[in-house]
Image: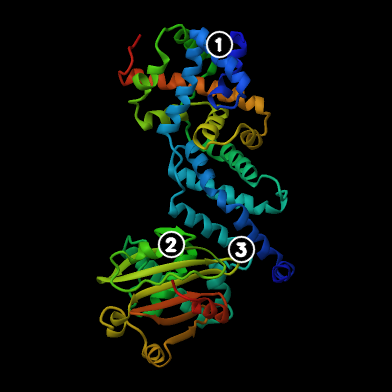
C-alpha cells in the first residue's frame, strides 16, 4: 500500500527504482560482452555506461515482463555499431570464404584430432586466443562470445540478436571454424605446428 | 546418417543439444567416418580452448560504482552541480560561498593525493565527512569493495584497522561499499550505503581517542560536548546535508546524507553488525 502511494505521488522516483532493480543486475554480463567487442577496459566501461543511460532514457518504452537482458543487449549492440565500431579501429577480420578453403585442406589431414588441442592450442597464450576471437567478423563474434564464454542458450542468443535459432546455429558453426583457423595461424606463429 | 546430415548436426552435438537417439546415430557415423569425426573434434576443441582461455570477467567494482553513480545522477530529484552551486547562489550568497569553498577544498585535496578518497586539508572531521560525501555522490570516492553483504564489507575494512569497524545491515539498503585511507598516519574507514529510493549515506569512521586528542584530526567543541553528554551530535548544513556523529565502541562514526533527519537517525539506530 505504501509502495502504491509512493508510485502515485512520485512516479519518476518509482521508475528510477524499478530501473535499478530490473536493469542494473545485468551489468556484469553486458560489461563482459562490451569488453570482448571493444577489446579494452576503458571503451567497455564507456559503452556500458552509455548503454544504461540510453536504457534509462527509454525505460518507458521497455515492455514489462519481456526479457530485459535481451533488451539491454540490443541497446548495447546498436550503440556499439553506431559509435564504437566507427571510432575504434577494429582488428583485421577474416573472410569466411578464405577460411573455407583452408578448412577443406586441413580436413584432409590425418592428424589425430584428440591430440590437436594439446599440440596446437594448449600452449597458446590467453592473449592469442583473445586476439583470434577479436578477429572474427562481428556477427560471428557475438554468437561465439554469448554461447562459448557467457554460456547462453541458442534460444536466448536468438532473442538477443533477433534472428531465428537456425541462424544462431549456423553462425556458431561458421564462427568456430573461423576461430579454429585463426588459432591455427597463431599456433604456427608460435612454432607449435609446422609452417607448411 | 550420411556426411551431409552429420555436418548439419556438429554444432548442436558440440553444445550437447541433441537427443539420445540422434546422438547415437551421430556417434555411429563419427566412428565410421574419420573426416567427419575430425570436423566434430575441431569444433569441440575450439569451443573448449575458448572456454578455458577467455573467461568471463566480473565487472570491476570501480566500473560498477561509476555506473551506479551515473544512473543515480539521472534521478529526477537529483540536482546538477551547477544548480547546486549557481542556482542557489542567486538566492543566498552565503550558501554559494560555502558551496564554492567545498569545491575549492575538494579540488585542492584531489591535487594533493592519488588516494581513492579525497582528503581535505581541514582537520575538522565534520568538514572531511561532508567533502567525502560530495565525493561519493560524484563518484570521485570509489569504494574498493561493493557488496550486498555488510559482513563482507566489514571484514574487508576491519583487516589491520586498529579500531572497531561498523557496517550495519540497514533497511532498504541496495548495496554498501567500503574504502580505507590514511591522513597523517591516522587510519580512516569510509562506508557508503545506497539506500533504495533515498540516495547515498556516507559514514566516516576513526579511532575515538584520536578524534578527541585532536592532534591530527579533531572535532568542534560543541560536537565533543554533545557526544560526551548524549552520545550523539547532529547538525544540518545550509544545503540540507544532515550530519550525525555517534560513538560505536572505540570508534567515532560520522554519517552524512541528504535523506531526511528522522529517517537517517532511524536507520543509524538499527543494530550494528
Q: Residue A39: x percent and y percent? A: 45, 37
| CB atoms of marks 2 and 1 within 8 Å | no
On the same chain, marks 2 and 3? The answer is yes
- Using the numbered discs, state the Cα–Cα distance from disc 2 to disc 1 in whole angstroms: 61 Å
**Residue highlighted by disc 3:** B75
Q: Nearer the viewer, mark 1 or mark 3?
A: 1
Residue on which disc 1 sits = B29
User: Helix, strand, or loop for circle 1?
Assistant: helix
State the residue in front, B234 or B170: B170
Circle 2 packing at 10 Å, graded few (<14), some (14-19), many (20+), is some
Crowding around mark 1 (Cα neighbors within 10 Å: few <14, some 14 to 19, many 20+) is: some
For marks 2 and 3 on the same chain, the one whose residue lies earlier in the sequence: 3
Q: Is residue A183 above or below residue B235?
A: above
Q: What label sits on residue B140 in the rendered view?
A: 2
Q: Residue at x 62, y 68 (%)?
A: B77
Of helix, strand and loop, which one carries label 3?
loop
Give the letter of the chain under mark 1.
Answer: B
Q: Left or right? Give the position of A115 relative to A142.
A: left
Where is residue B271 drawn, in percent x and y?
48, 76
Secondary structure beneath dot 2 equals loop
Q: Quadrant of residue B189?
A: bottom left
Q: Which mark is residue A99?
A: none
Whole-angstrom CA distance, mark 2 to mark 3, is 18 Å
Q: Chain of mark 2?
A: B
Mark 2 and mark 1 lie on one chain; the one further toward the N terminus is 1
Residue at the spot x=48%, y=8% of the render? B34
Amino acid at each position: 500500500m505504501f509502495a502504491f502511494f509512493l508510485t502515485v505521488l512520485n512516479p519518476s522516483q518509482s521508475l528510477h527504482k524499478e530501473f535499478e532493480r530490473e536493469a542494473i543486475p545485468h551489468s556484469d554480463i553486458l560489461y563482459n560482452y562490451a569488453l570482448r567487442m571493444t577489446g579494452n577496459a576503458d571503451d567497455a566501461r564507456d559503452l556500458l555506461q552509455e548503454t544504461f543511460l540510453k536504457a534509462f532514457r527509454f525505460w518507458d518504452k521497455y515492455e514489462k515482463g519481456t526479457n530485459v537482458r535481451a533488451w539491454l543487449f540490443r541497446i548495447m549492440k546498436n550503440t556499439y555499431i553506431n559509435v564504437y565500431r566507427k571510432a575504434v579501429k577494429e582488428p583485421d577480420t577474416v573472410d569466411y570464404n578464405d577460411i573455407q578453403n583452408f578448412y577443406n585442406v586441413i580436413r584432409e589431414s590425418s592428424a589425430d584430432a584428440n591430440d590437436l588441442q594439446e599440440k596446437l592450442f594448449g600452449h597458446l597464450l590467453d592473449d592469442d586466443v583473445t586476439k583470434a576471437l577479436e578477429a572474427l567478423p562481428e556477427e560471428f563474434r557475438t554468437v561465439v562470445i554469448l554461447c562459448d564464454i557467457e554460456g547462453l542458450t541458442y534460444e536466448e542468443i536468438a532473442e538477443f540478436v533477433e534472428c531465428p535459432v537456425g541462424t544462431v546455429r549456423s553462425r556458431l558453426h561458421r564462427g568456430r571454424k573461423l576461430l579454429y583457423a585463426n588459432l591455427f595461424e597463431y599456433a604456427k606463429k608460435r612454432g607449435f605446428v609446422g609452417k607448411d | 546418417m550420411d556426411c551431409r546430415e552429420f555436418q548439419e548436426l556438429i554444432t548442436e552435438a558440440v553444445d550437447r543439444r541433441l537427443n539420445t537417439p540422434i546422438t547415437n546415430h551421430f556417434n555411429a557415423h563419427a566412428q565410421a567416418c574419420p573426416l567427419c569425426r575430425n570436423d566434430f573434434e575441431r569444433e569441440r576443441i575450439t569451443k573448449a580452448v575458448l572456454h578455458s582461455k577467455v573467461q568471463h570477467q566480473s565487472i570491476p567494482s570501480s566500473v560498477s560504482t561509476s555506473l551506479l553513480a551515473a544512473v543515480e545522477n539521472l534521478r529526477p530529484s537529483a540536482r546538477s552541480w551547477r544548480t547546486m552551486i549557481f542556482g542557489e547562489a542567486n538566492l543566498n550568497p552565503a550558501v554559494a560561498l560555502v558551496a564554492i569553498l567545498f569545491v575549492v577544498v575538494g579540488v585542492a585535496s584531489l591535487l594533493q593525493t592519488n588516494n581513492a578518497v579525497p582528503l581535505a586539508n581541514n582537520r575538522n572531521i565534520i568538514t572531511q565527512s561532508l567533502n567525502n560525501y560530495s565525493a561519493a555522490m560524484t563518484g570521485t570516492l570509489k569504494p574498493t569493495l561493493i557488496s550486498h553483504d555488510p559482513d563482507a564489507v566489514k571484514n574487508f575494512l576491519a583487516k589491520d584497522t586498529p579500531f572497531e569497524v561498523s557496517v550495519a545491515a540497514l533497511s532498504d539498503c541496495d548495496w554498501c561499499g567500503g574504502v580505507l585511507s590514511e591522513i597523517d598516519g591516522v587510519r580512516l574507514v569510509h562506508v557508503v550505503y545506497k539506500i533504495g529510493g533515498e540516495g547515498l549515506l556516507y559514514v566516516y569512521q576513526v579511532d575515538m581517542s584520536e578524534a578527541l586528542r585532536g592532534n591530527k584530526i579533531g572535532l568542534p567543541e560543541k560536537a565533543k560536548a554533545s557526544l560526551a553528554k548524549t552520545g550523539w551530535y547532529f547538525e544540518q548544513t545550509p544545503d540540507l546535508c544532515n550530519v550525525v556523529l555517534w560513538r560505536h565502541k572505540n570508534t567515532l562514526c560520522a554519517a552524512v546524507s541528504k535523506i531526511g533527519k528522522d529517517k537517517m537517525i532511524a536507520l543509524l539506530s538499527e543494530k550494528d553488525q
